[in-house]
Amino acid sequence: MKVLLINPPLYGTGSEPRFPLGLGYIASVLREDGHKVQVVDANALKLPEARIEELINAVKFDAVGMTGLITQFKQVQRTASIIKNNSGAAVVLGGGLASAAPEVVLKKTAVDVVVLGEGEETASELFKALENGAALQEVKGLCFKRDGGFFKTAPREPLENISSLPMPAWDLFPVRHYFNNNVMCMPKRRMSMLTSRGCPYHCAFCFHGVFGHRHRARTAENIFKEIALLHEKYGVTGFVFEDDTFVLDKKRVYGLCGLITDSRLKLRWTCNARINLVDADLLAKMKKAGCVEISYGIESGNQKQLEKIKKGITVEQAYKVVDMTRKAGIITHGFVMLGLPGETAATIKDSVSFCKRAGIPAEFTIMTPIPGSRIYQDAVAANMMKRSVEDLVENWGSWLDKVLVNLTELPDEKLLEMKRAAELEIFSSYYKRHPGTIIKMLFLELKTNGFFAFFHRLKKGAKLLIRSLKGLGLRERPTT
C-alpha cells in the first residue's frame, strides 16, 4: 500500500521546526509492514498551502496519515481538505489533537479516522485493514463516523516495551531542516528524542490521553544506540530529550550518562525534569555527560496554587533545586502558568517574585484547559467554560496571544497585561543580577557554534533589550 504521511504547518510561533517524533515512528513501523511510505513535512519545509497541494498532486498514494498538535486544528483542517479535494484517499489523524478532541476533528474536518493514544500498533493494524478493505471496528484505538454518529473502538493498551520499537525513519524526512541555531549553547546539528512515555503524576492541568499515566522507559543502551546512529549518519552532536519525566528512573539516567561519558563523544543535550526528582549527585553526572540545560515545570510561585493543581512540589523546594542546578553548571529554564483557577494579582506577583529570587528566565503562558484534563472537567462542572469544545479547539492556535478561557476574576486584558509586565520584569532582573552567567553562556555559544552564532545571539539579546525598554514585550506577535 502506498502511504503518504504529512506533518502540517505550524504557523505564527516563530519557532524552528523539530523532528516530528510520532510521525517518524509511524513511518518506520509502516515501512516494516511492507508499505511504501513517503513523507511531506510541510512544517519543516515551511510550505505554503499552494505548494502543499502541488506536492500532494505529484505523489501517488492510497491513504494519508497526518499528525497534529491541539494548536494545529486549522492547519489540519486545511491540509485534510486539500487531500480530499485532490483524491479519494482515506485520511487518518493521530497525535495530541486527535486524542483530545476526536469528535470535533471528525465533525469539522475531512479526516476519516482518528487514532486515539499511542499510534504505532494501531497504525499497523489500521493500514492493513484499509489495504484489505476490512472492517475497522475490530482495530483498537480508533474513532470514526458511523450511522450518523461517532464510533469508538476498544481502547488500545499502552505499548509495554517501547525499546522494541524500530528507530524513527529519519531518511524519509528532510533532516537538514531540523538543524538550526535557535537554542543557545546547543549545537546546530541536534535532534529531538523520546526516551520514555507516560507520566505517573496527576497535575490537574495535564492531558494524558496519548501516553497515559504509566511510565514506560527505553533502556539506557537502546537510547545510546539511537544517539550513536544519529551521530554516525548525520553528524548530530546535540539532543533534546522531550520526555515529560526524563529523570524519573535515576538508575536509567545514571546508566545513559555513563555510556555517553565512556564513549568520549562530545555531546550536548537538554531535558525536562521535575523539581522533586533531582539531586546534586544526579546533576553532576548529567553535567559531565553533556547536559547544558534543564527545564522545570514551576507553574506558580504561590504555594496554595501549587496545591490546587496537585503539582506535588513546594516553592522552597523549587528554589533550592533551581539554585542546585545552577551550581552544577547547568542552565535552568522554567515554565510558569498564569490564569490558574483562583489566580489573583497577588498570586501572579508571587510567581514573579519567585523567578526573580531564583534567577530563572521563566517562560510565562496563559493557562488554557485541555479537554480531558481535570481542570477542564472541573471548569465544565462549575459552569465556567464559556466556550464550547469546538470553539476552543478551532481557536487554539492563538493561545499564546489571547485568553481563550478565563478561570479567574481578572479581566482578559488584565491577565495579558500582567503576563507582559511579568516577562519584562523578570527579563530585566535576570540580566541585571546574572551578568556572569550570561557571559558564560555567550562564550559557550561561541565555543559550540562559532563567531556568527555568537554575533547572532548578541544581536538577538540587544533586540530583546530594546523591546523591553520600549515596553513592547519579549516576543513579536505573529501576523498569521
Image (cartoon, helix red, strand yellow):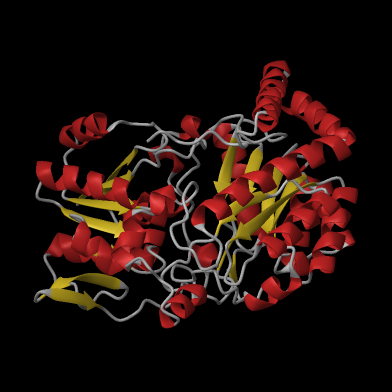
Tell me the quarter of the picture where residue 134 sits. bottom left
Where in the figure is residue 416, as x and y percent of width and height? 55, 50
Q: Is 295 rendered above or below residue 205?
A: above
Residue at 48% in and 40% down = 13
- Left or right relative to 438: residue 222: left
- Left or right relative to 356: residue 54: left
Residue at 87% in and 61% down = 320
Residue at 83% in and 53% down = 358
Q: Is 472 rendered above or below residue 200?
A: above
Looking at this view, is 311 or 157 the one in front? 311
Residue at 72% in and 39% down = 267
Looking at this view, is 118 or 464 the one in front? 464
Q: Is 230 rendered above or below residue 27?
A: above
Looking at this view, is 269 or 416 the one in front? 416
Residue 437 appears anywhere in the view: no
Where in the figure is residue 193, as x and y percent of width and height? 57, 50
Where in the figure is residue 259, as x and y percent of width and height? 75, 52
Tally of numbered tags? 0
- Left or right relative to 46: residue 82: left
Looking at this view, is 108 or 410 the one in front? 410
Tell me the quarter of the picture where residue 263 sits. top right
Where in the figure is residue 154, as x and y percent of width and height? 30, 81
Residue 477 appears anywhere in the view: yes
Q: Is 464 rendered above or below residue 381?
A: above
Q: In which quarter of the image is the C terminus?
A: top left
